Amino acid sequence: MAGGSSNAASVIQGVNRLWNCGLSGAQEHEIAAGLGSDVNFFLVGGPALCRGRGEKVSPRSLPAGRWVLLLNPGFGVPTPWAFKCYGETACKQGQEGGSLVLPDGGTFTLRNDLEPAVFSKYVWLEEAKRWLQGQGEVEDALMSGSGATVFALLREGVAEQVRAELVEKTRAYFGVGVWLEVVELLTASAEEPGEEQK
């Protein structure tokens, strides 16, 4: 899940601090934008809305106490291939899913436009999304980025025991070879809400 991009963001911030470069947040974001489309996101340090090709980042707050199940099949999807296939796919819009209500009263609709292209080859990912959406504890599921991780947003108030049961049920269905984790959503960014990096 964007391991290279998060590493790049850490290096930018680490070098700036260790070598006392004195770069402002805006300057760090300018460097990040030249390295990759989602490096800027990791400079924020929490939930954010990304625009453009990912370099325009607006920190957002998410509701507290929400959990996500992450499921990875153990193989990757080459990002360049995913975007090339997306560019060649007639149906370029992913199916709109559920909405997450934000603390400020706004909503965030779950959708990933890369899904139709990626699912055309990696049918395991489509099956994982479909199966997770069919579980009563799950509000909605989506592929993360260009894959291969699929995540399921759990319903509000799902108890720890129910989360553990979902993990066991998921392992039983997909097998022990998959990587599986349940994590709590970060609720706020390190940067001030409303601050946008351009």
Image (cartoon, helix red, strand yellow):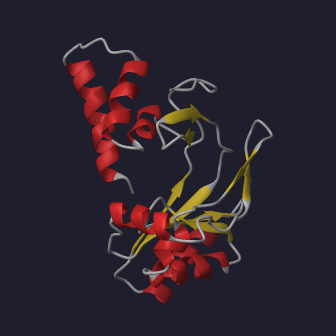
Question: At x 46% / y 39%, what residue is drawn?
Answer: 41
Give the image location of residue 154, x and y in percent.
65, 64
Seen from the viewer's position, the closer of residues 148 and 81 is 81
Residue 136 vs residue 127: left or right?
right
Of the 4 image quadrants, the one containing the N terminus is bottom left
Question: At x 47% / y 33%, what residue is drawn?
Answer: 44
Residue 25 vs residue 167: left or right?
left
Give the quadrant of residue 85. bottom left
Give the quadrant of residue 14. top left
Seen from the viewer's position, the closer of residues 107 and 93 is 93
* 140 vs 50: above or below: below
Give the image location of residue 101, x and y in percent.
75, 49
Give the image location of residue 153, x and y in percent.
62, 62
Question: At x 63% / y 71%, what residue is drawn?
Answer: 162
Give the image location of residue 102, x and y in percent.
73, 43
* 84 vs 28: above or below: below
Farthest residue toward the left?
Answer: 19
Seen from the viewer's position, the closer of residues 130 and 79 is 79
Give the quadrant of residue 127. bottom right
Q: How many marks?
A: 0
Question: At x 40% / y 27%, what residue is drawn?
Answer: 29
